[in-house]
Amino acid sequence: MCACVVGEMASASVFQDEFCCSICLDLLTDPVTVTCGHSFCLKCITGCWDQEDHKGVYSCPQCRETFTPRPVLRRSTLLADVVEKLKKTEVQSDHTAPSNVGPDDVECDFCTGSKHKAIKSCLTCLASFCEVHIQPHYEVPRLSKHKLVNASSRLQVKICSQHDRIIEVFCRTDQKLICTLCSMDDHNEHKTVSAIAERTEKQKELLEMKRDNQRRIQQKEKEVDEVEQAKKYLQASAQKADEDTEKIFKELISFMEKKRSEVKESIRAQEKAEVSRAEGLQEQLELEIAKLKNRYAEMEQLQPIEDPIDFLQSFQSHLTSSPAAKNLPKVTFETKFSFREVMKSVSPSLNEKTKQFLQDILKGRLLQDDM
């Protein structure tokens, strides 16, 4: 009776009503249990049956089942202990400090009036208890068999909606959480394991996913470094080519002076195009790294979850449906980019070679060959 009563408990009043005598409507005093299973105060049931002595037939005041001869009443030690605990917890609760429930805390379902912070939730009772009201679960033998977890506001999601039983089995065939009755009915021929066993397997999978994610991050960071080095070399090469070109142009005659600005513009355009390409790749790589780090952070938050149901539901919700980041093509950058051929074209001979140099520059052939 105790386990059934506690399992139905949603508030203090409901819990107490189950331990009240249906005759005097007060908490049981010297509780006794008759053959039909209902319990009453010793004084109350004795008074009722004394009035039925003349009939020789005695009935339960609650279910009206009859007994002959008059049953021998024996004190229910278990009920007496539970009622005593209830009285003590109510007295303690009345003298505790004001409510200490924060915005992210779970309220005690048993507190009347000012609610207190729950420290444990019972998967059998489907209720949460503060430090005072959890004590019967530690001290009453039958209550001590209940499954306690850290206080949670998500108790209902741990119950099978079809059978109203605790979810504690994982169906690998359908990839879903079920109760033991489900495993015997709709999932009878499916491959099923306990939620705890599945959590162990998923933890191993999670660790491997984390290692793979970390490798991806390291690879992308390496590629970013490569792009950065290529970009710096490209900029330095362009700067040197610009300086060398400037020196040669100063020795040229007015013809070269007129064309100098066009050559510099061509160099700058080529530099801008290459730097822009490098920066675009760098931005994409850094964005992918950020996504991978966010995914890694989700895995870090998921790993320490001990409750198998919370873990598996969160795992399926956040990781199973979230695709891994796609790999960008490996960056291939020509680190030997040079304007050397441009410089060779500017020779001491300021006649035919100068004119040819300018013609080649204007046609864009030399810059394309360097690429």
Image: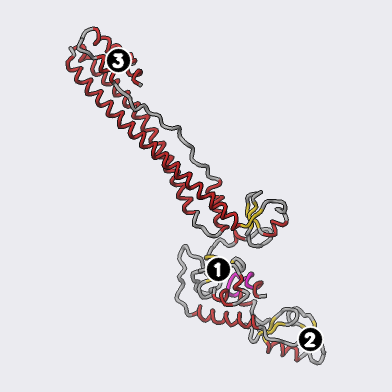
Q: Quadrant of the C terminus?
A: top left
- Residue 240 sits in which quadrant? top left
Magenta run includes residue 111: no
Instruction: Give percent across and percent down for residue 38.
Output: 71, 79
In the image, residue 335 above or below residue 263: below
Give residue 128's mark. Answer: 1
Q: Is residue 155 left or right of residue 262?
A: right
Name the element at disc 1: strand
- Residue 282 sits in which quadrant? top left
Residue behind mark 2: 58
Q: Is residue 232 left or right of residue 153?
A: left
Dominant SS of magenta comes to helix
Q: What colouring method underlies this structural image?
A: secondary structure
Which comes before the other along the chain, label 3 or label 2?
A: 2
Name which residue type carries label 1: Ser
Instruction: Give percent across and percent down for residue 23.
Output: 69, 84
Residue behind mark 3: 361
Dot 2: few (<14), some (14–19), or many (≥20) neighbours within 10 Å? Answer: many
Number of residue marks: 3
Residue that appears at 50% across and 69% down: 119
Mark 1 to mark 3: distance in Å?
Answer: 81 Å
- Residue 133 sits in which quadrant? bottom right
Q: Which residues are magenta?
A: 5-14
Q: Of all residues shown, which one is farthest toward the top? A: 352
Which comes before the other along the chain, label 1 or label 3?
A: 1
Name which residue type carries label 3: Ile
